[in-house]
């Protein structure tokens, strides 16, 4: 399929921090371990191998085998699970929330990036094995972020009361969501496949974690994807000493605060992505996920009557490690403690907060993974490519904000000059002469000259705006075609991947959609992909 690429920096959709990271700006070097180049993975493998135990591998594999007993999966995924028990097997991991029906398209791109990087590493290092992992964020509790997806410009939403970890939410009410979605799908084989997938995932499972596990496994099991549901006692037990350290010493707060100070000291416009709390843990029980705080020599859970002394708190960690849930600061550490992971693949916002964590990892002696920006894609049709050509547009043009795109195209399409820059420059020169004349005659006239300059400059700007507006009216038919095309490829004036659900493209391409993504996405290429399907 035809493809094209645009540097991330040229899209205008990625932060200064991420663009500088991709360019390996030297000022960011202290905040990551190794940049994700193929030649750097050998050293990363050796570091992780020294710092990951056989005992942890056994716990992980046993838990995964138990988890997959309830899932009809592929031989290659089961083989990958078994491989994880070997000291020569490593993971490439991405993670995502439990968005309804996968949420935006980039859910697919994250996982395909992990699948393809694992393949690339196997070719480069055949003496090792590499398995792609999707980490389900089952412990998140922000239901409003995940309870909908966009389909053909409409929000398909699951409305209900929710509390506690989202993975434990029962699927009550999703029958109504299915009816709404089904009515919008239309007829045909691919539409029926979407109905069947939604039904089997959400109407035939009792909680959101199991539904998402089924959905992701169905879409990616043929590629050996391993899905991790980490909210389990056996895995939390591996994390319990870290939890105690956090409760007693506020380790993450101290380490991450130091890093934030270093970031703030840089000569840049970098924004701190997350700020640590003194204790970066939640207390987790059925219907409850609230912050743990320490005040007056007592631990307590926010908005509850639950309290502990220090001894009682340590006993609680020993007895019920599953009740302690890491927040955004500690979740990456939990992941890297229980997985033999080499690289984390995430979006720009995710990588921004990972870049705050290296000192914390060093403090607790856990290998910091390589950080890779996930693949980003705009999918276009052959018909849309034809429209681009007829309108004499490039895809780079469509990455412009719509106002700027329309202004630029109006100037290009006009048979008269709309830019008054030369007139403004001439006016400026004339008033410079008048200022000199005033200085030589009567300096009291300087104010009057300045006022007149301001008035005439403003008048020129207004004429320029009126002329541009008039030309927009004259060229409205062609400009509207440009707007329509941009809105198709950038719905809501945003990136397609952040808005559109995969089901829209599945209706058109069916079960060829994911294979085409796997064929075309190159995770180490470091550019934004334009893919024609």
Image (spheres, rainbow, N blue to C red):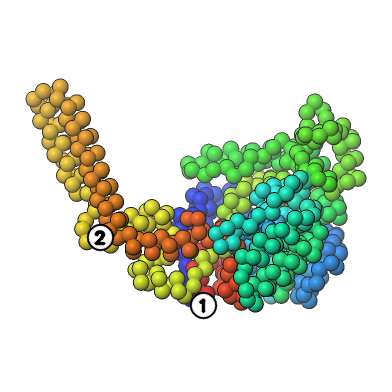
Any part of residue 205 in sight = yes
Along the line of sight, the residue nearer the viewer: 437 or 464:
464
Residue 331 coordinates in the image, percent (x, y): 72, 49
Give neighbour class at mark 1: few <14, some 14-19, many 20+ (Cα, 10 Å).
few
Along the line of sight, the residue nearer the viewer: 90 or 2:
2
67 sits left or right of 277 in the view: right
Residue 147 coordinates in the image, percent (x, y): 68, 53
Q: Residue at x 43, y 64 (%)?
A: 485
Residue holding disc 1: 1
Disc 1 element: loop
Task: Give residue 118's quadrant in the image.
Answer: bottom right
Task: Give residue 390's quadrant in the image.
Answer: bottom left
Any part of residue 366 in sight = no
Mark 2 or mark 1, which is nearer to you? 2
Find residue 414 and name its label.
2
Along the line of sight, the residue nearer the viewer: 419 or 493:
493
295 sits left or right of 142 in the view: right
Residue 269 coordinates in the image, percent (x, y): 49, 43
Q: Residue furthest left?
A: 441
70 sits left or right of 355 in the view: right
């Amino acid at each position: 399929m035809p493809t094209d690429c645009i540097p991330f920096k040229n899209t205008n959709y990625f932060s200064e921090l991420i663009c500088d990271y991709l360019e390996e700006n030297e000022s960011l070097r202290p905040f990551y371990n190794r940049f994700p180049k193929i030649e750097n993975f050998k050293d990363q493998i050796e570091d992780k191998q020294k710092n990951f135990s056989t005992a942890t591998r056994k716990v992980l594999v046993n838990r995964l085998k138990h988890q997959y007993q309830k899932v009809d999966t592929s031989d290659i995924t089961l083989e990958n699970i078994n491989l994880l028990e070997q000291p020569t097997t490593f993971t490439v991991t991405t993670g995502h929330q439990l968005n309804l029906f996968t949420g935006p398209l980039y859910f697919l791109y994250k996982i395909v990036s992990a699948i393809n990087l694992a393949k690339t590493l196997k070719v480069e290092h055949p003496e090792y094995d590499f398995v792609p992992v999707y980490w389900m964020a089952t412990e998140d509790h922000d239901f409003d972020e995940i309870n909908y997806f966009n389909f053909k410009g409409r929000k398909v939403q699951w409305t209900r009361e929710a509390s506690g970890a989202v993975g434990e939410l029962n699927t009550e009410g999703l029958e109504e969501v299915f009816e709404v979605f089904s009515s919008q799908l239309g007829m045909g084989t691919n539409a029926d496949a979407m109905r069947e997938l939604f039904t089997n995932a959400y109407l035939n499972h009792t909680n959101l974690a199991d539904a998402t596990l089924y959905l992701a496994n169905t879409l990616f099991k043929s590629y050996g994807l391993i899905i991790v549901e980490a909210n389990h006692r056996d895995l939390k037990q591996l994390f319990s000493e870290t939890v105690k350290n956090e409760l007693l010493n506020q380790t993450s707060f101290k380490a991450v605060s130091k890093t934030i100070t270093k970031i703030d000291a840089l000569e840049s416009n970098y924004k701190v992505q997350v700020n640590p709390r003194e204790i970066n843990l939640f207390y987790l029980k059925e219907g409850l996920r609230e912050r743990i705080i320490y005040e007056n020599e007592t631990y307590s859970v926010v908005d509850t009557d639950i309290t502990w002394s220090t001894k009682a708190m340590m006993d609680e960690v020993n007895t019920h490690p599953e009740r302690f849930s890491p927040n955004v600061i500690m979740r990456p550490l939990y992941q890297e403690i229980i997985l033999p992971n080499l690289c984390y693949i995430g979006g720009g916002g995710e990588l921004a907060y990972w870049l705050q964590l290296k000192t914390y990892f060093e403090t607790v002696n856990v290998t910091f993974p390589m950080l890779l920006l996930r693949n980003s894609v705009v999918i276009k049709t052959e018909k849309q490519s034809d429209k681009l050509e007829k309108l004499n547009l490039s895809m780079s043009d469509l990455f412009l904000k719509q106002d700027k795109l329309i202004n630029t195209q109006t100037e290009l399409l006009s048979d008269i000059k709309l830019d008054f820059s030369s007139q403004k420059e001439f006016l400026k020169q004339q008033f410079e002469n008048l200022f000199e004349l005033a200085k030589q005659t009567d300096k009291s006239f300087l104010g009057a000259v300045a006022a007149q300059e301001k008035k005439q400059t403003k008048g020129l700007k207004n004429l320029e705006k009126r002329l541009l507006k008039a030309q927009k009216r004259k060229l409205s038919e062609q400009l509207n075609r440009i707007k329509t095309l941009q809105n198709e490829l950038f719905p809501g004036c945003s990136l397609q991947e952040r808005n559109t659900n995969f089901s829209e493209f599945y209706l058109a391409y069916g079960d060829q959609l994911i294979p085409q993504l796997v064929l075309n996405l190159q995770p180490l290429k470091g550019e934004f992909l334009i893919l024609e399907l």
